[in-house]
Image: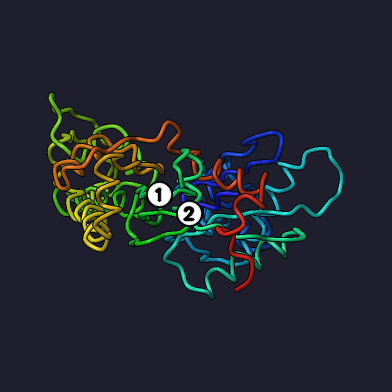
Amino acid sequence: MDLGTANTLVYVRGRGIVINEPSVVALDHAKREVLSVGHGAKEMLGKTPDSILAIRPMKDGVIADFRLAEEMIKHFIRAARGRRGVFRPRVAICVPKGITDVERRAVRDSALHAGTREVILVEEPIAAAIGVGLPIHEPRGSMVVDVGGGTTEVAVLALEDIVTSTSIRVAGDEIDEAIDNYLKKAYNLLVGEQTAEKIKKTVCSAYPLEREEHMSVKGRDLVAGIPKTLTISSREMREAIREPLSQIIGAVRNTLEQTPPELASDIIDGGVVLCGGGSLLRGLDLALNKETNLTMRLAENPLTCIVLGTGKVLEDPKKYDKVIIREI
């Protein structure tokens, strides 16, 4: 299971990926009952009456609401189980490299309370490297940059372990927030979370485009208090996201500065693999290449490689015994 800030993916042994849904829970405010989980709940974000709350239980790659995270995990396990009856599955969950022992324990406890019999944890950079097929068992350096919804994980791996890494709680969500803040300051326009995400996917870029693009945006005028429509450009959105983007680039540079020279040589030859939903930001590979002079390669399945790597650990735990975090 890839229990992500933005999306949760579930891999079942022998069946592959069976769940890929937003990490959102809709809750009846008065009764504290779960109304919807996943796609249905995400459609309610920013559109609910006072009686309903649409909440993301995950924040910055860790659990922000223990009870709702437990309900979400329980829902996804039940959906993945289908008609196979009642059983307590063994679950492997990937977690950010930079989280604390307490935060790891919260993930484990939530999964156990959701009805699993055993929980094993795998660090996200290692799961990503396994998922894209990097030679982590060899004495050769490999580098991955995982830009998710809540965290950016940068790691250099060799011999089944992380040699050097940087984990920052700046990723896709912070880019959305930067877009929202820019529109407030520049145009007094208030937009919702889903609109900011749409802008990011439609016109945002980390590197100048050959042909700059434009997009019509609708929101509420903060001064007049009425609906308002304006046109924004990819050029100004690039300026809007400059701060979170510079922090992501800084994390990559910081990791490279700590990398032993022999492994740095391997990375020059093999390049860097980009994965995670945030890696789909247009021009991110070019921006990172400009800063590091290294070849940047987008993973074949950037959205699913982490859960695929976690699935491989679940399929063959003996082969990947050294990468498993069993006790905290």
From the viewer's perspective, is 17 left or right of 252?
A: right
Number of numbered discs on residues: 2
> Residue 294: x, y in percent?
21, 42
Q: In the figure, 234 relative to 155: above or below? A: above
For the C terminus, give its image quadrant.
Answer: bottom right
- The residue singled out by tag 1 in the image is 148
**In the rendered structure, which amino acid carries the disc numbered 2?**
Glu
Residue 237 seen: no
- The residue singled out by tag 2 in the image is 124
Q: Residue at x 27, y 38 (%)?
A: 296
Q: How far separated are the C-alphas under marks 1 and 2?
A: 10 Å
Q: Residue at x 49, y 55 (%)?
A: 160
Q: Do the residues labelled 1 and 2 touch (CB within 8 Å)?
A: yes
Secondary structure beneath disc 2?
helix
Give the mark nearest the N terminus, 1 or 2. 2
How busy is the neighbourhood of tag 1: few (under 14 within 10 Å), some, or many (20 plus)? many
> Residue 278: x, y in percent?
35, 44
> Residue 282: x, y in percent?
26, 34
Taking depth in this image into account, of 140 and 100 the one nearest to the observer is 140
**In the rendered structure, which amino acid carries the disc numbered 1?**
Gly
Q: Residue at x 59, y 69 (%)?
A: 106
The quarter of the displayed image where residue 195 is located: top left
> Residue 188: x, y in percent?
19, 51
